[in-house]
Amino acid sequence: MAALSHCASIGSSVMAPEFAETDRLVTVTLDPNTITSVDPDEVHEWRIAIYDLLEDNSLAPARVKAEGPFALHVSIVGNSIVLDVRDPNTFRPITAHYLSLTPFRRLIRDYFRIRDSYYEAIRSAQPYQIETVDMARRGIHNEAAELLRTRLKNKLSIDLNTARRLFTLICAVQPYATRIDERQSALPTVLFVCSMNSVRSPIAAALARHAFPGQLIARSVGVNGGKADAFVHDVMEELGIDMSVHTPHTMDELVANRFDLVVTLSEDAREAVPKREIEAAATEHWPVSDPTLVEAGRDTILSAYRSLRDELSQRVHTRLAPLVSGGSQS
């Protein structure tokens, strides 16, 4: 079911900040380890909420001097939603804020209650009944937007319409949060490392999560920072895996430093991992090809990406099945 859209502007009790033309989001990604779903309708709802947010927004860090535009990476840790603002080209971190969901619990419940009533009214109610439900829907959005701006004051500057759209996105993703605390979880942990966390390692991690949903924690990083790769999105979409949510990360951004298995997928990763303070029960190197080096037409390049995807899929299934079932890590 599609997310409810934002509503018309009203007066705000929070003083409206002034925004430069570049103070806006151009990319929104979701953390695939903490926001998970295999239901295409739920993923479609996320996409609608993201599209609505990107269509018209104003956002800027409040305490950090940075020129936009910006990328927003969203994850859920415990009872907080993490709003991680980054450079949209390099994905270099700019600022991040942990927003507690506790003050929003009632509003989130009301959002879903009113949403269901609204769609039911559209199907069978009289026009005046639809208008009544719609007014209640608008009221929820307005109250939530005001609270969101208040909670983000002196952290992230957003206007009221952006706050409405952001609240819709929060509602869309939070029911599907895994809320796994990696520091306390007993699930097997796997880290895939490649050169720039753009192609090989994110494909491997996504395939691992897809093959063993809820049975392991799979992360991916790069030795250096990279950019999102459109060909990765295309070939993974063929399997129903949405890679538009991927944000490239570097080894310096790792929170956890102990894994059951670390897999390197490039020569520079193979050299870099031993130099880092990463504890691993087992470390392996998978010498796979780099499809970004292929210089040819689109069809040939896609074929190279598919070959990598299929090879990694086979390796992931064969290697991780024993790990997930509690077998040997070596």
Image (cartoon, rainbow, N blue to C red):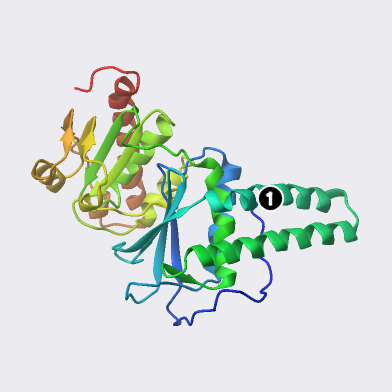
Up/down of 271 relative to 18, above or below: above
Direction from residue 84 to residue 282 in the image, left or right: left
The residue that appears at 51% across and 39% down in the rendered structure is 37
Up/down of 121 relative to 161, above or below: above
Quarter holding the C terminus is: top left
Q: Is mark 1 on a helix, strand or loop?
A: helix
The residue that appears at 46% across and 38% down in the rendered structure is 178
In the picture of the structure, the residue carrying the numbered disc 1 is: 110
- What kind of residue is marked 1? Asp
Q: Residues within 10 Å of mark 1 (few under 14, many from 20)?
A: some
Up/down of 158 relative to 232, above or below: below
Direction from residue 265 to residue 121 in the image, left or right: right
- Place residue 317 in its image quadrant: top left
The residue that appears at 77% across and 53% down in the rendered structure is 118
Direction from residue 224 to residue 32 in the image, left or right: right
- Closest to the observer, 77 or 162: 77
Residue 204 appears in the picture as rendered = no
Q: Position of residue 318 (x, y in %)?
A: 30, 24
Residue 26 appears in the picture as rendered = yes
Q: Position of residue 280 (x, y in %)?
A: 18, 32
Q: Position of residue 8 (x, y in %)?
A: 69, 71
- Place residue 314 in its image quadrant: top left
Q: Position of residue 311 (x, y in %)?
A: 30, 35
The residue that appears at 83% across and 51% down in the rendered structure is 121
**Mark count:** 1
- Place residue 159 in its image quadrant: bottom right
- Closest to the observer, 112 or 295: 112
